Image (spheres, rainbow, N blue to C red):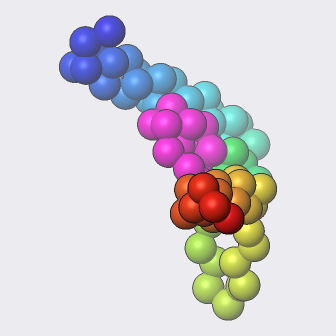
């Protein structure tokens, strides 16, 4: 698919996700942190990027993906004689 068309369709998907999310927020009159994170996950997924939450005062927690990336990096640096 051409890049411009792909970008356009990704934008439409994000607009649709935000629209559904905002309808629910308006219907129940609140936004919970779980709902906000769910929306952020959908947007990150549509964009093809990883979601990272930086909360002041909280220690970062490594995800399984982080551990896998670290292992892959070590394996890349090993020499054939090791």
Give the residue furthest to the bottom.
57
Hey, which residue is sitting farthest front in the picture?
81
Q: Residue at x 69, y 60 (%)?
A: 71
Of residues 81 and 36, the one drawn nearer to the viewer in this rendering: 81
Q: Magenta segment, principal secondary structure?
A: helix
Res. 8 visible in picture: no
Query: Vertical placement of 16 versus 18: above or below?
Result: above
The percent position of residue 11, horizontal first and vertical second, equals 37, 27
Q: Name above or below for residue 7 compared with residue 78.
A: above
In this view, the residue in front, 48 or 13, is: 48
Q: Please tell me which residue is depicted at 22% across the width and 19% down the height of the picture.
A: 4
Q: Is residue 57 visible?
A: yes
Which region shows up in magenta? Answer: 39-52
The image quarter in which residue 66 lies: bottom right
Was residue 47 drawn as part of the magenta stretch in this picture? yes
Horizontal side of residue 45 vs 27, given as left or right? left
Q: At x 56% / y 50%, what residue is drawn?
A: 50
Specify whether 48 is left or right of 74: left
How far across and how far down the image is residue 69, in percent? 63, 57
């Amino acid at each position: 698919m051409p890049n411009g068309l792909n970008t356009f369709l990704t934008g439409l998907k994000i607009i649709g996700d935000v629209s559904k999310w905002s309808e629910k927020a308006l219907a129940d009159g609140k936004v919970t942190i779980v709902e906000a994170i769910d929306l952020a996950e959908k947007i990150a997924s549509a964009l093809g990027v990883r979601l990272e939450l930086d909360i002041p005062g909280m220690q970062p927690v490594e995800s399984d993906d982080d551990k896998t990336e670290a292992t892959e990096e070590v394996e890349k640096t090993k020499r054939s004689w090791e």
